Image (cartoon, rainbow, N blue to C red):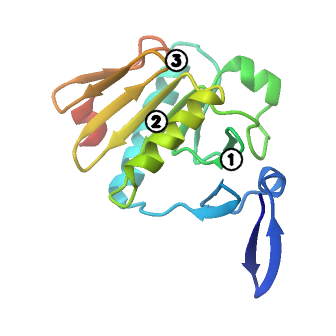
Amino acid sequence: MVTTTEVSNVSKVFTLEDYMLNPPDNTEWVDGELVEKNGSTAKHGRTQSRLSYYWGNYMNSNNLGGEVYISADCRTVGRGRCPDVAYLTTELLTQYGNNFTVLPQSFPLIAEIISPTDKAEEVFTKVREYLESGCQEIWLIFPDSQWVLVITQQQQKLFNLGDVVSTQIMLPGFSVTVDELLA
């Protein structure tokens, strides 16, 4: 599928291949269309920054290698996505390098920070895509309701205020309180 975009009042056909070569900022490529990511708030940005810092610090202090990214594009099953926070293992970093434009698969560990404008069906469709494209663990973070839902192929765990949320597969041993993450 292709989509037509307006760039300086000039129409241009935009394919998934175009997206893979040069994804426009703050967009995802879904069902043949560029979809703008919106709904970011200060709370969203703060949560994104904190989780990136926590994952990166844990990764470095435990000599796990890899990289943590904020808003880096990846390819899922026929779509281009841009997770809020993502971890790339040393093995995949060796395979793809760190100068990719769009990672040709999902990141192994992804966090999506859910905004009030996100629709549940779209969020869970994205989760399914990530899992079908190489992701092993996804954190859905709900800053307003103060929940964290951790999803793998085998399980889903919901964490509330007062709970300690921990990774299930990736970054073994990492944990943080929901209160600290969402404070």
Quarter residue 157 falls in = top left
Location of mark 2 (residue): 53
Point out the frontmost of discs 2 and 3.
3
Give the spatial CA distance, label 1 vs label 2. Answer: 28 Å
Amino acid on which the number 1 mark rests in the picture: Arg
Task: Please determine whether, in this image, residue 80 is positioned above or below residue 150.
Answer: below
Q: Secondary structure at mark 3?
A: loop
Contact (CB < 8 A) between labels 2 and 3? no
Q: Secondary structure at mark 1?
A: loop
Residue pictured at 37% horizontal, 55% vertical? 115
Residue pictured at 42% horizontal, 36% vertical? 51
Q: Secondary structure at mark 2?
A: helix
Location of mark 3 (residue): 170
Quarter residue 9 falls in = bottom right
Quarter residue 173 falls in = top left
Residue 176 seen: no
